[in-house]
Image (cartoon, helix red, strand yellow):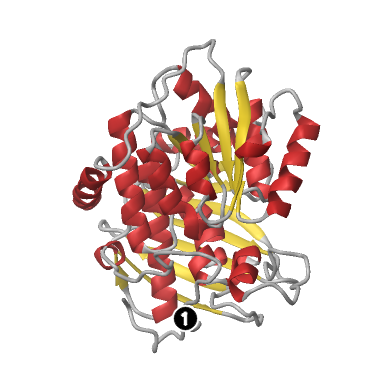
């Protein structure tokens, strides 16, 4: 790593640590709970917050990760989601699902009810707009956490996640992130080769997430009794306060997490971008963007992301070094070509399962994994790209980190009404 990049990274870490320490000091005034250091014979009790498809999958993977794990509590806004998820899990793993009726929590306060119940590990799988406050509550209560992406939808949320990561470290709690590619065996092998100098110094990285249309999350009809709030939460992809922009933050978030990995987790100094909405929607997000990140030492990172039906699809990474190129996603295995020729030939591994395997193993070993800082930085990198695309401005890392734009209402209930910002217009939308 060059001196310039090291200096840039140290500056960010100092800033992140000061924000986190201040917030953590406040957090310690809240409820206190001892962290879980489970002996090998103890059963770990798992609670699921967010019972959609991803939450159900995460619960299944958690229950498969360890012989002594049980699902004992579930929480969701909607009874139909919870019931469908519970039925699937009971059918697949009846011996490990023990969710009594009194531990099936519903409503906006359901997450806190679950956290306050006798669970040891909490799975956070709601729409991303809820992630930061749910993580804060779980860590304050002394729970280990699996947190799906993205970590937050705005900079205040990222700062909250940094504080939660700091508090988790103090309490000896695990936070494993749903940014799953770092748990992929083939990519781990590729990174090791890159670290060993197989492609020489990295000059640029290009990551793509070109996928089919993402116009709907909820596939049922909107019934007359559904309020705007209920409809938005059920069909959350296109609403900025819930998804943060599903194309840039969720799809693109995976890509920039990998980009950060290739570049030793240095963060970019600035970004410029373009983006728009091509297919109409009721929400206020984009469905395509291209972001150019510039690092302190002059290295460039490029993110292309698009959610359009009928277009070319690709989820790939091109790491361009002075002596070669590593290509990931254009075939079954990562490939290095140049001064060194290499192709991954190890066994395939399910990275989604590996995340949970390593989470529970770290709890058993009293050596908890803490992905919290990394998932916060990755999320902010994606937010930085979104800010650049939405405003048409060059956005620096410091501007992104200290942004005061808040997208999520402070308090939510079924009577909440709030004015959403209009869809951005580059060149007119201000940088907040």
Which quadrant of the figure has residue 204? bottom left
Q: Residue at x 61, y 31 (%)?
A: 72
Residue 423, given in percent of the width and then of the height, sits at: 50, 82
Which quadrant of the figure has residue 421? bottom left
Front-most of 173 and 428? 173
Q: Residue at x 42, y 32 (%)?
A: 174
| Mark 1 neighbour density, 10 Å: few (under 14) some (14–19) many (20 or more) | few
Q: Residue at x 59, y 40 (%)?
A: 48
Front-most of 410 and 193? 410
Give the residue at the far top of this rendering. 41
Residue 253, given in percent of the width and then of the height, sits at: 49, 56
For residue 24, say whether it is visible. yes
Q: Which residue is mark 1?
A: 419
Determine whether, in the image, residue 414 is placed left or right of residue 368.
right
Residue 28, given in percent of the width and then of the height, sits at: 25, 40
Give the residue at the far bottom of this rendering. 428
Classify mark 1: helix, strand or loop: loop
């Amino acid at each position: 790593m060059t001196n310039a990049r090291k200096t840039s990274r140290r500056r960010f870490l100092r800033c992140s640590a000061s924000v986190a320490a201040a917030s953590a000091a406040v957090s310690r005034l809240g409820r206190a709970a001892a962290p879980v250091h489970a002996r090998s014979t103890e059963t770990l009790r798992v609670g699921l917050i967010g019972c959609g498809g991803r939450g159900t999958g995460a619960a299944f993977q958690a229950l498969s990760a360890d012989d002594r794990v049980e699902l004992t509590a579930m929480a969701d806004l909607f009874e139909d989601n919870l019931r469908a998820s519970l039925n699937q899990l009971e059918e697949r793993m009846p011996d490990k699902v023990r969710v009594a009726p009194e531990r099936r929590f519903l409503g906006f306060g359901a997450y806190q009810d679950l956290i306050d119940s006798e669970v040891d590990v909490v799975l956070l799988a709601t729409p991303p707009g809820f992630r930061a406050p749910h993580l804060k509550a779980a860590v304050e209560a002394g729970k280990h956490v699996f947190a799906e992406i993205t970590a937050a939808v705005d900079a205040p949320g990222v700062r909250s996640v940094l504080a939660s990561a700091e508090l988790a470290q103090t309490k000896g709690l695990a936070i494993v992130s749903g940014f799953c590619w770092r748990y992929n065996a083939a990519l781990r092998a590729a990174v090791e080769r890159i670290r060993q100098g197989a492609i020489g110094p990295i000059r640029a990285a290009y990551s793509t997430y070109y996928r089919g249309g993402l116009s709907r999350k909820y596939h049922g009809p909107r019934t007359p009794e559904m309020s705007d709030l209920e409809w938005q939460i059920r069909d959350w992809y296109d609403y900025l306060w819930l998804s943060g922009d599903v194309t840039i933050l969720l799809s693109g978030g995976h890509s920039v997490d990998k980009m950060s990995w290739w570049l030793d987790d240095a963060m970019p100094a600035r970004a410029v971008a373009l983006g728009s909405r091509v297919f109409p929607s009721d929400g206020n997000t984009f469905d395509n963007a291209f972001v150019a990140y510039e690092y302190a030492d002059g290295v460039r990172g490029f993110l292309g992301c698009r959610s359009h039906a009928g277009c070319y699809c690709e989820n790939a990474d091109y790491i361009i070094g002075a002596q070669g190129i590593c290509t990931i996603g254009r075939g079954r295995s990562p490939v290095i070509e140049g001064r060194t020729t290499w192709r991954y030939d190890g066994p395939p591994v399910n990275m989604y399962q590996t995340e949970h395997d390593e989470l529970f193993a770290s709890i058993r070993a009293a050596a908890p994994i803490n992905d919290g800082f990394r998932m916060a930085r990755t999320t902010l990198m994606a937010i930085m790209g979104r800010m650049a695309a939405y405003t048409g401005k060059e956005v620096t890392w410091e501007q992104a980190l200290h942004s005061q734009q808040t997208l999520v209402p402070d308090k939510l209930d079924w009577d909440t009404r709030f004015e959403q910002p209009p869809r951005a217009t580059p060149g007119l939308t201000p940088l907040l």
